[in-house]
Structure formats: C-alpha cells, structure tokens
Amino acid sequence: MDIRVKQENLPTPTAVNGNEPSVIDLCSSDEEDDGDASRIVSSVGEKRARSGTLNTPAKRVAVSAEEEGFGQSSEQAIVALPATPCNVVRPSPSPSCKQFWKAGDYEGTSGGHWEVSAGGFDHVRVHPKFLHSNATSHKWALGAFAELLDNALDEVHSGATYVNVNMLNNKKDGSRMLLIEDNGGGMNPEKMRHCMSLGYSAKSKLANTIGQYGNGFKTSTMRLGADVIVFSRCPGKDGDSFTQTIGLLSYTFLKSTGKEDIVVPMLDYERTGSEWSPILRSSISDWNKNVETVVQWSPFSSEDELLCQFNLMKEHGTRIIIYNLWEDDQGLLELDFDTDPHDIQLRGVNRDEKSISMATQYPNSRHFLTYKHSLRSYVSILYLRVPPEFRIILRGRDVEHHNIVNDMMHTDQVTYRPKEGPGGQSNFSNMSAVVTIGFVKDAKHHVDVQGFNVYHKNRLIKPFWRIWNAAGSQGRGVIGVLEANFVEPAHDKQGFERTTVLSRLETRLLIMQKNYWRKNCHKIGYVSAQGKKAVKDSEDRESSPEYAVSTRKRAAASSSFKAPAASAAAAEQFDSRKNVNRGGKGSVRDSKGVGSEKSGKFGNTSSKLNGRAKPKGAPQAVEDVNSDDHSDYDPSGEENATELPEKNFEQPKPRSADSRTLSQLEQENETLKERLNKKEAVYLSLQEELRREKELRKKLEAEVQRTKDELEEVKKEQESLIDIFSEDRDRRDKEDEDLRNKIKSLEEKSRGRR
C-alpha cells in the first residue's frame, strides 16, 4: 500500500489582541523529533521524525492511515481536521437533541477555510452531520440491529460461536447502553480503521458473507444511539501477534466541540510477552490527547477502565457499546427494555397491542404479528439457516431459530427462474428460487396473515412481503418462503432495489398466490375462487381429479334430464343448507348471477351448455407473466372450481328422506367437530408442554454452562491461591533458614569468645 503525505497550505494566522497565534493540530507531533516517542510504527513516520517534518510551521502535515493519531484509513480518510487557531472563538454548541429524527440540526462553525492539498487538488470534507443523515437510511430500528448481527455472523469463518446482545448501565450518568459482542477473529488496527471509514468493505469480495457496502456499522450504530465505542482484540495472521484497539465514533463529541470533520480517536496496543504496550503512531503527546478524548466522551472514567473491557473477552473478539440511546417524543427511550426482561422491543407505531394479544391466541402466526416490535421475534426468522454451532444470545437467553415453513400446511413448492436477458443470454445462469407456499396453520380461523419472506444470501430482506392486496378475503392465510440471490438488496437491507428482475419476480409471486388460493381456498372454509358451491373433500379431488370431473359431468346430465322440477328444487335447498353447515364463511355465494346459475345447473341442459361455452378465463381474468416457468398454473383448476360438488348431482330423494339424511349429517358433523376440538386441545397442550420442556432444557444448559464457568474460575482462583501460598511458604522457609544460619553464626561467635 502506498502511503502518501498530504500537505495543506494554511493561511497565515494574524495576531489577535496582540497575542501570537497558536495552532491546534491534533494530527501532527508537538515535537520536531521523535525523542518523546518510544516507537513509531509507520516507516514513513520514522523518516518524517528523523527529518523533523512532523510539525512544519508553514504547512500542516495531515498524516495518512498508518500515522494518524486519530486513526484514519489511507484509502478512506474520514479524519481530516483542519488546523484551527486556538484564539478563534467557536460558537457555543446547541443543546444535544435526544430524538433521532431531530438530531441532524447541526451546522458546525461557519466560514471555514478550504485548504488546497499537496499537488494542487482540493479534498472533500466529511461533515459530522453526515453521520446522522447517513443513518436515516434505517427507518426501522430493528433493521439496525440486523446489520450488527450480520457482522457477527460473518465472523463464523474466523471461529465465532456466539453473538451476545444485552443492556448495560452507564456508570457515569446511570443511563442505559447497548452491548453487541462476539468472539470472532476481531479487528487489528488497520481493520478497525476500515470499519470506522465510510464505504470501505472487503466483504464484497468474500463468498458467504452478508455485508457488501461498507456502511452498515456506521448507519446501524448511529441509528440506535448518538455514540459508540468499539473494543477489538485480534490474534493476527500468525496467531501470535496480538493487538487490541479502541475506537470512538461519537456524534456528541463532534457536535459539542464544533467539529467540521469526522474525527475518530483511536488507541492501539500490542502484546509483548505477557505485557500490553501502546502503539505510538506519532508522539506521546498525541497519544495522551487520544486517551483524554476517549475518556472524556466515553462511558469510562480512566484508561484502566477502558482496558478492563478487554478482560471480558477471551483470546479474541469484538465488543461494541452504543450509548446516549435515542428517545421518542415523550422522552422515553425508543428501545423498551422493561416489558420483557429477555427481549428488546420498540415503542410507538411498530407496537400494536391487538396483534400482541392475537399472537397468544394464534401461536403459528406469532412471528407475523410480533416481528415489527420484538427483536427476539425478528431475529428468530432473520436467517434462513444458522450454523449449528453458532448461538444468538439476547439478554441472557438464546434466540431459538424458527423456519416459517414449520407454520405452514398444505404446502406446495414451485421453482422460479429469472427470465433470460436480451439475445437469449441469461444474466443469472444456474440461478433459481424454490418458492414454498402454503396456508398458515391458523388460516382456518380466518386470521389476516399473508405474505412472502424473501431471503437474500440467507438473510431476510422482505419480511412477509404482501403482494396481493385484494379487496375481500382473497389470499388471506397464504404465506411463502424463498431465497432470491438474483435480486440486489437496498443499502438498509430492508428491501430490494426496484429493477426489472424484481418486478418480474413480484408478478410471478402474485400469480403463484392467486393460483394456490384458487385451488386450495376451500380447504380452510372459503368459497371457491368463482363464488360457486364448495368443492368436494380435498383428498378425493387431489387423488383423482379426472375421475371427479367425469363423474360430475355424468351426474349433471342425469339430473338435468331425469329429475323433476320439485326434486331439483329440493336438492338445491339441501345442497345450500349442507354447504352452510360445512363451509362456514366459505358458504357465502357471490352476488353476481346466482339465480341464473341455479336455473342453469338444475333447470335445463341448454343454459348449462351455454355457460360452458364461455372461455375458461372468462369468469376471472388471469394476468399473463413473462417468465420462464409457468408449471404451477393449472388451467383446469379454474374450471373445476366452478363445478358443484359431486353429491349435488345425485338423484334427489323424497323430502322425508332428505330431512332424515340432513339431521343425520348434522349429528355426524357435530360429533366430528367435538372429536376434532378434543384432538386440537390435546395437540395444543402437547405443543405447549414441548415448548416448556425446550425452555427448561435451555435453562438447564445455560445453568450447566454457568456452573462450568464458575468452576473454571474457582479452579483458576484456587491455582492462583496455591501459587501465592507456595511462594509465601518458600519465602518463610527461606527466612527460617536465614534465621537458623544467623543463630548458628552467633553461637559460633559466642563459643569463640569463650
């Protein structure tokens, strides 16, 4: 990597009130040599130190990534603090706003000088206000949590086995803070500077990683709170060159001190033997400035307290603490830590009390009803697959991974392939999406739950994407899951870029949902798609559709020519009453053309034949989609949906027999309902018992782990005490030996005198 020295020509400061001007330079050394520096890491810094150019009177030297006291990247220089005369009076900072959407009202000092850098090129500053405007890409706070969890999951290849999200208390002011920590490979000083820089990402070049834009850490942390401090310990490539780094990204610090550039104080340490020593990048004076700044604007009161955070890690890992959390309009924290001690929830519009109460009544729809306000619910469906050895711990309890497919019944699978590009060349060779579609298990209660969970590279991008917005109850209860790696997510990873590929996918999913509804809605008590009578039992229809169609045609012909008018009317009345008992809400007929259909089905053959002469698509228009795969569309399904049940065309019996049959059917129906209710109650009780057993197992495992950790700590303490006692015993033995020797010498002297 080429490291260049960037020089900026400063205007000559003028004396104010007869005093000589002085320059505050937080980047360069206060001495012309490196006598105060025990070690300068950068080779360029060593050359500058020897040549005495670390502090030039006429020019300000802005040191690049390897030399910058506040730690800027050589490629992404976000630390570019211009020299400022100390006698220039800065405007008093405005009171700190604790509401996120109002915190961007900050202009900094006005009339700042723009210097020309070396080579005559102007450089662009990054104003602190950009941190806030950049974070507004997250409209939803839980999406910011997802970004930080993505970073932890990406560390699985570095050995990460868990990520822990918890709440901490700020000892300085008693406020609440967020903790996100993992035991991954950590970040060395260079990677820490990349993390704090804007737009830098090496993950886009790596396979099986979620991050790609190099912006998630900044947007997510600044969306949750005004300030963040990061502690990271890295074993190095050889596993033996350990470093640990502290980085502070504080919007409060930048705004309160009137900065016009984003300044990031950083502290680097390296391990030599068993001792940790600072890595000085310029001088001791600059190091002390960094320490003072971090201590003043962080939740910690001394450098020792900062270093104690590394003791909470093992050999490697990263510990992120977000503080000065944002508040809502009522002065309460946006994040609710009190409602559930094992969850972090949102206040305000994302929280719907009606949905929360429904979630207890309909457990299979719980994630749909609660993911908008509950971090635990959202994280449980955030990833399509989680490595078996990786744990996501939220406030002391593991988040149990949940697959939405387990909430479905009557599932189908449809393979979707993106359409080929111009000239027949496919831009997505060997790419496809297997769409699993079905009814949610609570659909029989007619809960308004529907949508597709669309994942990209294992990460949930569109949770419960509602595509079909029908005026009535059509589409209700239909949910789906797919992983679409051929569409690009937006920067906040809560949606996709609106492209032609996405539009085609959306249209195709709409057709899938409509076809699935048309074929299966009768299974949960809805009327068929054409508004006619409910079809026969789903098992008979699915097992032998050809036989069902032929039987209905023969029965229809027989009934239309042989049945008298009175018998036909009785059969019609019997069918309508039977469908009311069996279909529930699904027995309601459409208001269009009911009378004509009655006469057409049972009156004469000509009206029935005229009705069949219409095209298959006439009752309901089907949207044509330009896609590669139309295998899930069954034209015969629409025709079958318009047919009456098979029993409706049997030869009607006398009225007395009809009434007896009807009463018998009603009794059987009631008996079946009672048996079904009992079985459902038993199933729900078993399911609840299983859930309790799982929770108990998790608690016991956690207790066992805690006990193991405590035993390990006790063992370590015991060993340390044994060492101390052994040393003390050796010391006493030595003292006793010395005393004995002295006594012997004294005795010998006394004998000699005698």
Image (spheres, rainbow, N blue to C red):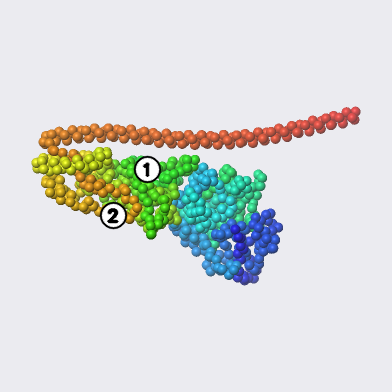
- Residue at 61 percent of width and 66 percent of height: 7
Look at 47% across and 50% down and name the residue there. 210
Q: Position of residue 38 (x, y in %)?
A: 68, 54
The secondary element bearing badge 1 is classed as: helix
In the displayed structure, does residue 692 sit left or right of residue 6?
A: left
Instruction: Return the residue at label 1.
Output: 405
Residue 432, image x, y percentages? 39, 50
Q: Residues within 10 Å of mark 2 (few under 14, many from 20)?
A: few
Q: Residue furthest front?
A: 424
**Residue 339 seen anywhere in this rendered image of the structure:** no
Residue 502: name its quadrant. bottom left
Residue that numbered label 2 is attached to: 623
Identified by mark 1, the residue type is Val
Q: Nearer the viewer, residue 638 or 190?
A: 638
Name the residue at 40% across, 43% down: 403
The amino acid marked with disc number 2 is: Glu
Whole-percent x, y for residue 370 in the image: 38, 46
282 up-or-down from 337: above or below: below
Q: Please name which of the two marks, 2 or 1, marks the residue nearer to the observer.
A: 2
User: Disc count in the image?
Assistant: 2
Q: Is residue 543 above or below residue 197?
A: above
Location of the N terminus by quadrant is bottom right
Q: Residue at x 47, y 56 (%)?
A: 135
Q: Quadrant of the C terminus?
A: top right
Q: Which picture quadrant has residue 76?
A: bottom right
Q: CA distance from mark 2 to mark 1?
A: 27 Å
